[in-house]
Amino acid sequence: MKGVICRPLPALYTVYVLRSSVRKSSLYIGSTPNPRRRLKQHNGDTKGGAMRTSRHSLRPWEMVALVSGFPSMIAALKFEWALTNPHLSLHIPKESRLTVAKSPGKARRGRKRRRPRRPPHSLLSVVSNLHLLTGVPSFARWPLDLHFFAREVYAAWEKWVAKSKSKARSTKSKSKPSISRSRSRSRSPKPAPPCRAGMRIWTDFAEDAEPDEPTGVHALPIDYKPMKDYLQKARDVVGFEREGACVHCGEELESGRGLHAMCPLDGCTAMGHLDCWSRHGLAGDDEGHMLPDLLHGPAAPAGAAANISPGLGVA
């Protein structure tokens, strides 16, 4: 189709939380496709950075938490703005808002401020709003991963989620389980309490690593390597025109014609029409969603649904 620009999903785009290693109460929120490079910029090792992190008295900065899985730069920027301005963001319903704006007050030279002043960030406010934003309708069905690189920040997250879970039980609300993982089996922490369906939580603490082992943002892949096996199995099938019949409706798939998707589960090469996958993933959904967030083939064992983090391979 003429005029349509195809933009691939970025290998990595993140929203991160910085903390001053000198003054722990100083926090900064930003977004980047390359956390390692961005951290160097904030610490003055390379050109760039931000005005708010340029004070030498607050350096070095460390990345203590990070959200990944955004489908585009614009998506990450929307989340970043909402996390930075939770008192103003329209993504947060008014009745659910945790951070309240301060009165505008007076600006310099006697001019009145039209926009309410942003309350200062604290560890509690950032963690609580992270929990809130990953569950609001605007972001709840995005394939987001949450990473923690500081043990006390992860502990604050666990404490807040446990508190929210207790509050939800008291109001008889239903909560879907989350998927909690650690980057290394030898360094697995206690799993995080349920938060929202499909969101994976990773922890990687420097004090638990070997002396020469990269940790935190230095261990994050910033290329398409995590998707390599998934893309390879799709290419093996499509390249030799072995699509076969749609796994859902049984109709033969014409190679090179139409939108066909492959099961995201490891080792499964089941393919089908994109709309068939959608109907299958939304079976039983009564909330009017257009796209599923968890998928598996019809023959997959119970509980084997996969988060569509890498996206369905479309041929």
Image (cartoon, grey):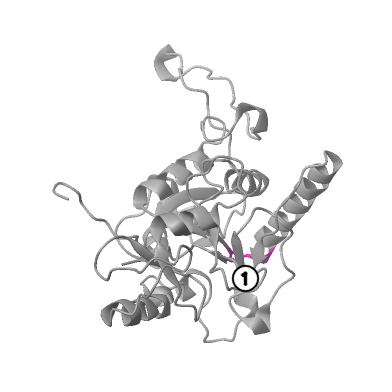
Residue at the far front in the pictured view = 251
- Answer left or right for 242 relative to 176: left
Question: Is residue 29 on the magenta stretch?
Answer: no
Residue 176, image x, y percentages? 70, 54
Q: Which segment is the magenta one? A: 147-151
Rendered view: 111 above or below 120: above
| Pick the front one: 175 or 107 | 175
Question: Is residue 150 on the magenta stretch?
Answer: yes
Q: Is residue 229 visible?
A: yes
Residue 123, image x, y percentages? 64, 49
Residue 198, image x, y percentages? 60, 59
Determine which residue is flagged by label 1: 304
Q: Name which residue type carries label 1.
A: Ala
Rendered view: 309 above or below 235: above
**SS of the residue at dot 1?**
loop
| Pick the front one: 140 or 23 | 140
Residue at the far left in the pictured view = 2
Q: Residue at x 86, y 41 (%)?
A: 170
- Answer left or right for 100 relative to 51: right
Quadrant of the frame with the C terminus: bottom left
| 10 Å crowding of disc 1: few (<14), some (14-19), many (20+) | few
Q: Quadrant of residue 100?
A: top right
